[in-house]
Image (cartoon, rainbow, N blue to C red):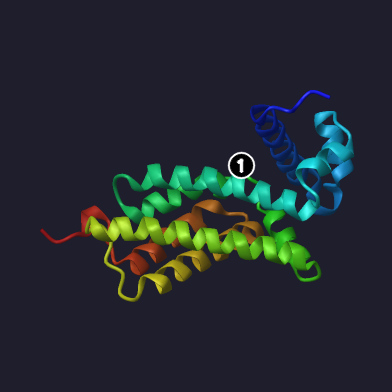
């Protein structure tokens, strides 16, 4: 039997993660079965289990892919200008409805009864904290933010603001209002003001 080269394994894994993300967005978590994901890319369910022994592990990979994409986008947006606006510009695609945040809400609901999914969310939260902390430390060293409290508290507050904003968009359906509220709240948390209101 021929050996599977590492490049092929990486490509196959990436295809599975991409297909799973599409299926979860389209059908939700309950409808996003391993059978459905296998059909999406034209492989057997057994082939999926070679890469991801459980649905929760596949969910973790989908979340990791989304997080990596978001962190890259966030780094680019924070490279210049108002940090509060940079954070929110990176969220714009979510706030404008390009990504279905209902999948995240379904994950939270499933985590209540499924310890493996609960662990996926814990790992995701730890990675989010680590990335936001790193970016805030860079901004603080550059003198672009001036948080009033410890950096860990600032990180937690920002993550809570993000979660609350996403929930508000789902419930109220008005991303522009939620966006403006988030920018104002982030400026308070980060200790910044818009350029036009700074004293000369």
Looking at the image, the residue that sits furthest to the bottom is 149
- Count the labels in the image: 1
**Which residue is rendered at x = 57% and y = 63% of the image?**
125
**Horizontal side of residue 167 vs 197, given as left or right:** right
Residue sitting nearer the eye, 26 or 156: 156
| Residue sticking out furthest to the top | 2
Q: Secondary structure at mark 1?
A: loop
Number of residues whose C-alpha sits closer than 10 Å to that of mark 1, classed few (under 14), some (14–19) or many (20 or more): few
Q: Position of residue 147 (x, y in %)?
A: 31, 69
Q: Quadrant of the N terminus?
A: top right
Q: Position of residue 131 (x, y in %)?
A: 46, 56
Counting from the top left corner in percent of width and height, residue 170 is at: 65, 57
Image position of 55 (left or right of 191): right
Among the 4 quarters of the image, the one containing residue 40: top right
Residue 5, above or below 129 = above
Q: Provide the residue designation for mark 1.
A: 98
Measuring from the top left, give residue 47's x and y in whole percent: 84, 36
The answer to which image quadrant residue 165 occupies is bottom right
Question: In the image, what residue occupies the spot 22% across and 59% down?
Answer: 143
Q: Residue furthest left?
A: 200
Seen in the picture, residue 111 relative to 47 is either above or below; the reply is below
Please state, as top left, top right, bottom left or bottom right, where the C terminus lies in the image: bottom left
Quick check: can you spot residue 100?
no
Seen in the image, is 152 located left or right of residue 104?
A: left
**Observer-nearest of 14 and 21:** 14
> Can residue 33 be seen in this snapshot?
yes
Is 160 located above or below residue 139 in the figure? below
């Amino acid at each position: 039997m021929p050996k599977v080269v590492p490049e092929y394994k990486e490509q196959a894994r990436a295809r599975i993660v991409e297909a799973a993300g599409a299926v979860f967005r389209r059908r939700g978590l309950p409808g996003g079965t391993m059978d459905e994901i296998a059909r999406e890319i034209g492989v057997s369910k057994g082939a999926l289990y070679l890469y991801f022994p459980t649905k929760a592990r596949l969910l973790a990979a989908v979340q990791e892919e989304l997080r990596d994409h978001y962190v890259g986008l966030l780094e680019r947006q924070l490279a210049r200008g108002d940090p509060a606006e940079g954070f929110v510009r990176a969220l714009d695609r979510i706030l404008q409805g390009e990504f279905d945040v209902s999948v995240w809400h379904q994950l939270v609901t499933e985590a209540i009864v499924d310890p493996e999914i609960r662990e996926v969310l814990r790992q995701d939260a730890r990675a989010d904290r680590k990335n936001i902390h790193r970016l805030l430390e860079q901004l603080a060293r550059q003198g672009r933010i001036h948080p009033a409290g410890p950096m860990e508290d600032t990180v937690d507050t920002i993550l809570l603001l993000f979660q609350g904003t996403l929930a508000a968009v789902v419930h109220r359906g008005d991303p522009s209002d939620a966006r403006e509220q988030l920018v104002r709240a982030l400026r308070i948390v980060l200790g910044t003001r818009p350029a036009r209101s700074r004293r000369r």
